[in-house]
Amino acid sequence: MPSDRRRRTRVNFHARADIQTLGARLLDLETKDLSHKGVFLLGELPLKDGLGCTVTLHLVGETENAPTLHMEGRIVRSTGEGTAIDFVSMDPETYLHLRNLVLLNAEDPEEAEKEFGQPAFEDPEA
């Protein structure tokens, strides 16, 4: 169902990100946008579609204790413009931070809130 891929609210969100894959570690990358299901990184990156990865987002805050978010992901598209990563799992605390970031930056927070009622990840037990 390719049409279902982009049904999550994406918000403009600029932060620094690190990507770890089998055999590569890319540091200090720039994000373009974010949803509670994925992130888009700017620039041409040497990442192949389908490759699993760990994403670390470094949130910029007024204190040195700004949260760092860690998600497991999969590369879904990599072009000269940038790379789209689909999140496949994250811990509950990261999910809450991500939810708040999306809701605070969404053009339509009420619509974004509805999306959080829909499953974002496949159930590995199913």
Image (cartoon, rainbow, N blue to C red):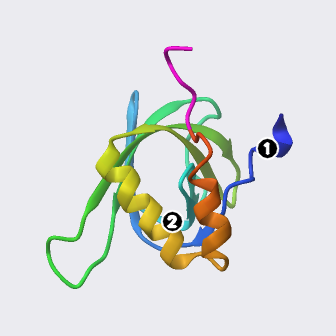
Q: Mark 1 points at which residue?
A: 4
The residue at 50%/19% (across/down) is: 124
What span is in magenta?
121-126
> Is 113 or 105 nearer to us in this picture?
113
Left or right of 30 on screen, residue 7: right
Left or right of 67 on screen, residue 90: right
Residue 26 at x, y = what percent? 39, 49
The residue at 74%/53% (across/down) is: 7
Residue 68 vertical placement versus 55 (above, below): below
Left or right of 123 on screen, residue 96: left
Residue 37: in magenta span: no
Residue type at mark 2 is: Thr
Assess disc 1: are there few (<14), some (14-19) or many (≥20) residues with their C-alpha within 10 Å of its C-alpha: few
Q: What element carries label 1?
A: helix
Can I make out residue 28 in this image?
A: no
> Is 86 or 125 nearer to us in this picture?
125
- Quarter of the rendering containing residue 100: bottom left
The residue at 49%/77% (across/down) is: 104
> Is 54 or 106 nearer to us in this picture?
106
Q: Name the residue under label 2.
A: 31
Q: Residue 72 carries which label?
A: none
Total numbered labels: 2
Residue type at mark 1 is: Asp
Residue 17 at x, y = what percent? 39, 59
Q: How far apart are marks 1 and 2 (CA)?
A: 22 Å
Residue 126 vertical placement versus 54 (above, below): above
Q: Is mark 2 on a helix, strand or loop?
A: strand
Residue 2 vertical placement versus 23 (above, below): below
Disc 1, disc 2: CB below 8 Å? no
Quarter of the image with the C terminus is top right
Quarter of the image with the N terminus is top right
Residue 125: in magenta span: yes
